Image: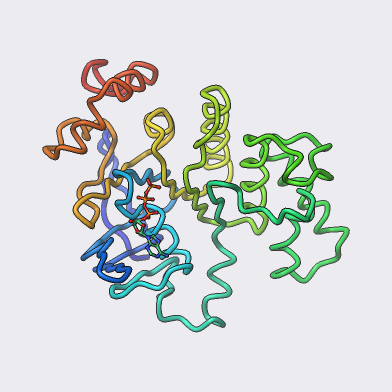
Amino acid sequence: MDGAAHTSETGTTTQREAIIKVRGLRNQFGPQVVHDQLDLDVWRGEVLGIVGGSGTGKSVLLRTIVGLNRPAAGSIEVLGVDVVNASQAERGPVEQRWGVAFQDGALFSSLTVLQNVMAPMREHLNMSTRLMKELAELKISLVGLPPLACDKLPSELSGGMRKRAALARALALDPEIVFLDEPTAGLDPIGAAAYDELIRELQRALGLTVFMVTHDLDSLYAICDRIAVLAEKKVLVDGPIEGMTEVDHPWVKEYFTGPRARAAQLKTGKGPETGGE
Ligand SMILES: Nc1ncnc2c1ncn2[C@@H]1O[C@H](COP(=O)(O)OP(=O)(O)OP(=O)(O)O)[C@@H](O)[C@H]1O
């Protein structure tokens, strides 16, 4: 296991396993350098929140890790596999060990929810349609959708239901890592809080590692174990959210000490003015 010793607040020392290791990452589109010398570790079992100003490259980072964007330089190791240089044959097995839910769901519009969730199973698993259907129904119920959602097209669902359907599809192959791009964007506060709770429950029940790009301060305070802030083309700082108010950087200060952050701190009891957890 490739990891690092980690001492918790209770003084227990455990070995953390870096399930994703990004080193010296560079992403560039024409003259625009989005990432330069970006390093990041993601620890097994954590919910990591990726934040940063608009255009700092949060989505590009996610897309690069899952292989939808080829970096200009640097290395990315996921579950021990060098995913940048691996052949398609080498990538296949590791790709089955993660799931991705994009902001708009990115569901196949002409397929029902059930067919959408079955799609990755058809691609990667060699099992009967009946068994795949049963498994897909299980995932759909796991994300809190009613059975009648199975036969609906994405266009027949509410935004919140579409996000849950996308999550069910991301969970189709029992992944170890789930990548979420702005999972609560566009949801009302009650729907967003329910979605956060769902992620937390699934992460605990299934032992998932969650890599979540978000702007939602409530989500960050409610469910993230750790935050990584993108600024200056790299991960400027990472750590528990409670420490973010101490970071001496204009964007980080404004974001984590502004009125919305204070409201989120009060809700969760985390933060300097609430005396922490
Ligand atoms: N395929 C692409 N071609 C050219 N430029 C791109 C491409 N993808 C992303 N970019 C640029 O890279 C920068 C980072 O984009 P990205 O979507 O990762 O930002 P973000 O941090 O997720 O922003 P937001 O919070 O607004 O969603 C932007 O300036 C964007 O225009």
Check the image and report above or below for 65 versus 250.
below
Check the image and report above or below for 226 versus 255.
below
Q: Nearer the viewer, residue 101 or 203?
A: 101
On screen, residue 24 versus residue 78, left or right, reads left
Q: Position of residue 213 (x, y in %)?
A: 41, 46
| The residue positioned farthest toward the front in the image shown | 31
Q: Position of residue 46 (x, y in %)?
A: 41, 46
Residue 132 position by quadrant: bottom right
| The residue positioned farthest toward the right in the image shown | 130
Q: Nearer the viewer, residue 22 or 162?
A: 162
On screen, residue 8 versus residue 171, left or right, reads left
Residue 253 position by quadrant: top left
- Name which residue lies at 31% across and 42% down: 227
Check the image and report above or below for 276 versus 232.
above
Q: Position of residue 239 (x, y in %)?
A: 26, 42
- Name which residue lies at 38% across and 45% down: 48
Quadrant where the N terminus is found in the figure:
bottom left
Q: Nearer the viewer, residue 21 or 216?
A: 216
Q: Position of residue 49 (x, y in %)?
A: 38, 43
On screen, residue 177 versus residue 111, left or right, reads left
Check the image and report above or below for 241 versus 234.
above
- Name which residue lies at 22% across and 49% down: 231
